[in-house]
Image (cartoon, rainbow, N blue to C red):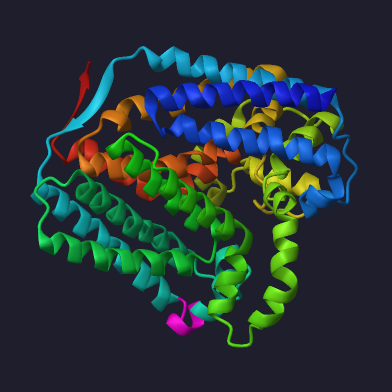
């Protein structure tokens, strides 16, 4: 019965996906729906059919009733609420506009590129040099490295501007307006640094997000889906998700046995590819089941504002910890932010069904706001399109993890650039 209802939800989301693409192209909502299908349809089905093969390892020490019908209905209510949230703002006629200037595009791309490179260099230097970072990048990314440097980690977040610079120049070249030969050279240099930055991130998420951002720019400019390019893109994304960690490890380990890998691990990984991919996104649905099955106390929407008062902890005030810490602790007893709850579980732990309806509606408005603001399908400014492609893959975090505090903490560069766009560039918000 649970699988049947999930399939109905899946069918509804697929219908919404095609409707969204037809009207808005590869929008923020479009990407949110794709993640929704993976997290709240494919993952639950896989958990029901083969729990031990798919469940996130942190959950295996507990017993969860994955056939429980109530969480499925809660997921359905959430998506209805999110859809209504998108409708609540879809009729608003406003748009951010900026006059096109080739000089301004080059200048903006180069400035954010320099900021990104300087941030990356500061990060490398703070951790003792390139050799140390290359040898320990997985530990640095996961926070398990002995040489912790929180200032360097914060500054390193601005290295994402290298990716933003790439996307702005990519959009500029795709539009082909007043492009000079020097622009191709600039783009080549930026591309090299972008790939290096992604490599140092030591995570598959960054690489996949980068590929998706490129697709957003391409489809926004050319308004069509090329079969060959999309097939190549899908293949690269699929292989990077499966073998990204292995590839990064092999690049930095001279003892890596590639013959043994291709003879044994490669085909086994391909055979188990579905379970491997889905297992990365099982914690959101299991978090929801956990909240409902064990009936924890509601948090009464406090997680929307706790992050504001977090600095007061230094003065001795008792401020509740973030939802991700709470969720991780109740799952396997460690006080860390390793297991964010996901959007549906976040809403439920606030105030049950009321919290789910409220959070779904708010997220629908939030996602649609940026789609309408930037109108990527009709966007003709490389800076605005590049930034939109940049945030499309970043803002889906509010669905997949849905911890407002961590969202804001890790997206300060995005927010600052948006403020700069509105305050210092010749942009204006106009009613249409």
- Residue 322: image quadrant is top right
Residue depicted at x 85% and y 31%? 293
- The answer to whether 102 appears left or right of 18 in the picture is left
In the rendered image, the quadrant that contains the C terminus is top left
Q: Position of residue 285 (x, y in %)?
A: 73, 36
Q: Position of residue 214 (x, y in %)?
A: 37, 49
Residue depicted at x 59% and y 75%? 249
Q: Is residue 109 above or below residue 230?
A: below
Residue closest to the eye, 217 or 301 = 217
In the rendered image, the quadrant that contains the N terminus is top right
Give the total number of marks visible in the rendering: 0
- The answer to whether 415 appears left or right of 170 in the picture is right
Residue closest to the eye, 309 or 119 = 119
Residue closest to the eye, 120 or 334 = 120
Residue 128 forms part of the magenta stretch: yes
Residue 373 forms part of the magenta stretch: no
- The answer to whether 166 appears left or right of 128 in the picture is left
Residue depicted at x 88% and y 34%? 65
Q: Position of residue 84 (x, y in %)?
A: 53, 14
Is residue 320 visible in the rendered structure shown here?
A: no
- The answer to whether 60 appears left or right of 281 in the picture is right
Residue depicted at x 68% and y 23%? 9
Q: Is residue 59 above or below residue 150?
A: above
Q: The magenta stretch spans which residues?
A: 127-133
Q: Is residue 147 above or below residue 370?
A: below
Is residue 45 visible in the rendered structure shown here?
A: yes
Q: Is residue 254 above or below residue 205?
A: below
Q: Position of residue 372 (x, y in %)?
A: 34, 24
In the current view of this chain or complex, which residue is farthest to the front? Answer: 228
């Amino acid at each position: 019965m649970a699988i049947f209802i999930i399939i109905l939800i899946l069918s509804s989301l697929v219908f919404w996906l095609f409707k969204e693409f037809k009207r808005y192209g590869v929008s923020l909502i479009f990407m949110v729906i794709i993640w929704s299908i993976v997290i709240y349809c494919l993952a639950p089905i896989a958990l029901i059919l083969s729990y031990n093969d798919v469940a996130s390892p942190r959950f295996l020490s507990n017993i969860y009733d994955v056939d429980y019908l109530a969480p499925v209905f809660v997921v359905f209510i959430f998506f209805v609420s999110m859809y209504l949230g998108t409708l609540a703002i879809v009729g608003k006629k406003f748009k951010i506009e900026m006059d096109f200037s080739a000089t301004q595009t080059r200048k903006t791309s180069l400035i954010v590129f320099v900021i990104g490179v300087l941030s990356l260099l500061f990060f490398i230097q703070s951790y003792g040099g390139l050799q140390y970072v290359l040898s320990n990048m997985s530990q640095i990314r996961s926070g398990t490295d002995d040489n912790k440097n929180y200032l360097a980690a914060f500054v390193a977040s601005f290295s994402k501007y290298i990716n933003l610079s790439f996307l702005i120049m990519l959009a500029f070249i795709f539009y082909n307006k007043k492009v000079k030969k020097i622009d191709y050279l600039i783009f080549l240099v930026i591309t090299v640094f972008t790939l290096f930055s992604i490599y140092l991130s030591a995570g598959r998420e960054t690489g996949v997000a980068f590929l998706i951002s490129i697709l957003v720019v391409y489809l926004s400019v050319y308004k069509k889906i090329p079969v060959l390019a999309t097939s190549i893109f899908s293949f690269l994304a699929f292989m990077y998700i499966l073998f990204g960690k292995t590839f990064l490890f092999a690049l930095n380990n001279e003892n890596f046995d590639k013959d043994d890998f291709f003879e044994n691990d490669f085909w086994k990984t391909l055979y188990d590819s579905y379970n491997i991919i889905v297992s990365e996104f099982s914690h959101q649905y299991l978090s929801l089941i956990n909240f409902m099955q064990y009936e924890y106390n509601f948090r009464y929407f406090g997680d929307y504002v706790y992050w504001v008062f977090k600095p007061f902890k230094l003065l001795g005030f008792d401020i509740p910890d973030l939802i991700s810490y709470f969720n991780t602790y109740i799952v396997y007893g460690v006080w860390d932010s390793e297991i964010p709850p996901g959007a549906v579980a976040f809403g439920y732990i606030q105030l049950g069904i009321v919290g789910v309806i409220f959070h779904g509606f708010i997220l629908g408005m939030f996602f649609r706001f940026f789609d309408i603001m930037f109108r990527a399908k009709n966007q003709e400014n490389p800076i605005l399109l590049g930034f939109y492609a940049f945030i499309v893959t970043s803002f889906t975090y509010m669905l997949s993890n849905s911890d407002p505090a961590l969202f804001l903490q890790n997206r300060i560069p995005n927010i600052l650039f948006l403020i700069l766009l509105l305050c210092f560039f010749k942009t204006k918000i106009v009613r249409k």
